Image: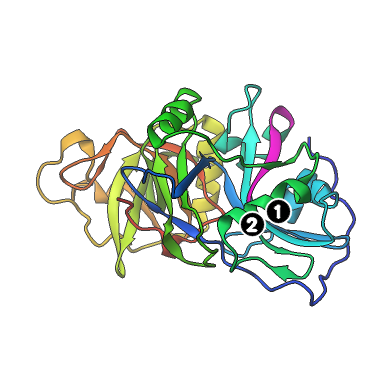
Amino acid sequence: MEPARAMAPKKKSESLPGFVAPMAAVAVKKLPEGEGWCYEVKFDGYRALVIKDGTWVEIQSRNHKNLTAMYPTVTSAALKLGASRVVIDGEIVALDERGRPAFQALQHRSSHGQHQIAFYAFDVLHVDGRDTTGEPIEKRRALLPKVIGENPVIRLSAELPGSAAAVIDAVRSLGLEGVIAKRRGSVYQPGDRSSDWQKLKLEHQQEFVIGGFRPDGASIDTLLVGYHQGKELKFAAKVRAGFTPHIRREVRLKLDRLRTARCPFTDLPTLGPQRWGGGVSAEQMHEMVWVRPELVAQIRFVEWTAEGRLRHAAFLGMRTDKSADDVHRES
């Protein structure tokens, strides 16, 4: 199990900036190539900022939630960073015995004893009074090795050598989620989804909003998930695979608090025949329990069908680090 959280002051000084919304990457089907780009692993974890000011440490999620108490080993490791005041951008990852990310283990503290919690740092936004967001990515990344030092928990997300094709082959062979390409010379754009950062997922997965479920006693049989298109919540899939009995009960408890009488999906019930069993007919609507669309789940799938549904969808885990309002269909 993770050790108790290190003691630290409850407030940071005015020498560090307030919350900085992390820069986001654009999803692409093909990585950009050439000397103007560098590549990194896309980790399957929780995006977060590690903030240190003397002996004060806080871990913030991308939507400004305080994760400090959830990951005390990262908090303790941050106290050993080689800078008095620093803001580092990166990903919290649970590593299995083979060193591969295990996303579901992040959400269950009972699993932390069987997995190593690590923070992979890939950018630095502030260091000892210096705002680095306006500096080129090469200069920012050059600061990281000295800031991190010899730290088994906070690690450097290394640049991957070689062509885009070689990088993709290497990352795929390791069973990792994907690759991030970053434009050399680019600055950090807080809160923006910029084409200076481009992500290629090697398997199809993304976040979806939960809008309902089919119950099974005190558990769930099926999740109903979708995505925002403008102000509408569009239905994407019925998800039955990927659950353990324990997770089915755990998700049911979260959803029962959000029950509502009204279906939040604007395109249900489904009209006409649906391939792969992807829709919800008018006859099936009464079998479902509707919830306020506030919770987000990570879903893996084979492809989008012609009807705009997910084929062979499987549940990977809940995303407490992402806002439902920000979930849209990725290209």
- Quadrant location of residue 10? bottom right
Front-most of 34 and 11? 34
- Residue marked by disc 1: 143
Q: Residue at x 49, y 54 (%)?
A: 184
Q: Residue furthest bottom?
A: 14
In this picture, residue 35 sits left or right of residue 73: left
Q: Residue at x 79, y 65 (%)?
A: 128
* Residue 84: image tag: none
Q: Amino acid under label 1?
A: Leu
Stretch in magenta: 113-123
Q: Residue furthest front?
A: 35
Q: Marks 1 and 2: in contact by CB < 8 Å? A: yes
Image coordinates of residue 262 in percent, x first then y, are 33, 64
Image coordinates of residue 97 in percent, x first then y, are 66, 22
- Residue marked by disc 2: 140
In whole angstroms, how far apart are the C-alphas of marks 2 and 1? 6 Å
Q: Amino acid under label 2?
A: Arg
